[in-house]
Image (cartoon, grey):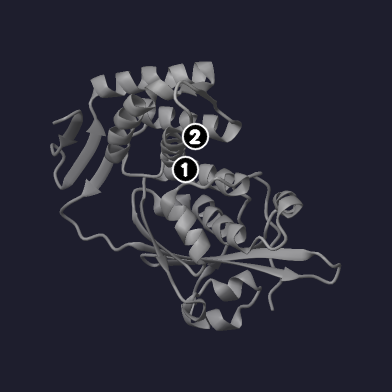
Amino acid sequence: MLGVVVDTSEKGVVTVDNKETRKLDLTTEIQKILETGSLRFDTLPAILGRVQYAELRISGREGKLAMADIRDSERHEAPRSTITLDDTCRHAFEILLSRITSGQPKRFLGDVPDKPVCVFTDGAVEPNSDGGVDATVGGVIIADNTTEVFGSKVDQQVLEEWLVELVHPVGLTELYGVAVAFNLWRRLLLGRRVIVFCDNWTAIDVYIKGSSPLRFWRQLLLTLERLDQSSGSLVWMARVPSSSNVADPRSRGKWDELEFLKPFTFCKPQCPVTGRALENLAVG
């Protein structure tokens, strides 16, 4: 129906995907954009319509940044102009192309109640004794009978790049904590419904919109698109008060407030941007 395939042949499962002919049309369109490295203003309305409709069938984060760039260009660029893609926008279109050409259909379980996975994340930015700042993140996941936690410093290279332009990158640190959690716990998130609890409105707003004009936010959003592409999760972002956020103690290296969660496993995450192991926070 209207370029969409809804498959109910597997008992208790509904899969939704774009028709092959629509995939072919979109693939050709996006490949042209990537080959030329630019968007023509006079083609934007047609591209916007086709990609936006297909994006709704994907039901995930893939392509959100590319779609936001197309919409922004349509609103602000002069007629007959050509918009050159920057590196971040190019990568966004590459992710969208990959999802259309090789991504799996979205699967929804319809017969067995499935408890959502709960993920709590937090970030903290505090001055240090050297006159600079320390940025730290923490996370807790509760998935069925499994509880795991982490508490780590933000990758030093990533933090230094932020501090070139920002003085107090607390919002970025909060969103970085979400990316660290998704990267660490992909095995527990595969195909699951996920509720992410965060206590920072800026990070929540940027995550839900899936777009930002600011360079470092865009880099993290692209990282989250890649992680979402590999997990196939259905994610709901919700705000939790800091006093109720069980990830808050971990972002500050504290254990005593997590006694009620035991038994749990302490994890050692990697940076989702650089791939390096993150330095764990000392237990306090």
Q: Residue furthest front?
A: 78
Q: Residue furthest right?
A: 130
Residue ID at (55%, 57%): 175
**Residue receiving disc 2:** 92
Of helix, strand and loop, which one carries label 2?
Answer: helix
Q: For residue 279, what is the image quadrant?
A: bottom right
Check whether the beta carbons of the residues at disc 1 and disc 2 lie within 8 A of each other: yes
- The image shows residue 79 at horizontal and vertical percentages of 44, 25
Residue ID at (16%, 36%): 7
Mark 1–mark 2 distance (CA, rounded to whole Å): 8 Å
- The image shows residue 267 at horizontal and vertical percentages of 58, 61
Say few, some or many: other residues with alpha carbon within 10 Å of mark 2 (under 14 / 14 to 19 / 20 or more). Answer: many
Of helix, strand and loop, which one carries label 1?
Answer: helix
Image height check: is 158 above or below 151?
above
Residue ID at (68%, 75%): 283
Instruction: Give the amino acid type for the residue marked by disc 2 in the picture.
Output: Ala
- The image shows residue 55 at horizontal and vertical percentages of 32, 37
Frontmost of labels 1 and 2 is: 2
User: Can residue 40 be seen in the rendering of this structure?
Assistant: yes
Tell which of 197 and 170 is nearer to you: 170
Q: Which mark is residue 225?
A: 1
Instruction: Give the amino acid type for the residue marked by disc 1 in the picture.
Output: Glu
Of callouts 1 and 2, the N-terminal one:
2
Q: For residue 278, what is the image quadrant?
A: bottom right
Image height check: is 64 above or below 265?
above
User: Can residue 151 be seen in the rendering of this structure?
Assistant: no
How many numbered markers are drawn?
A: 2
Q: For residue 105, what is the image quadrant?
A: top left
Q: In screen coordinates, is 15 left or right of 184? A: left
Locate the N terminus and report the quarter of the image it occupies: top left
Tell which of 194 and 277 is nearer to you: 194
Q: In screen coordinates, is 251 left or right of 201? A: right
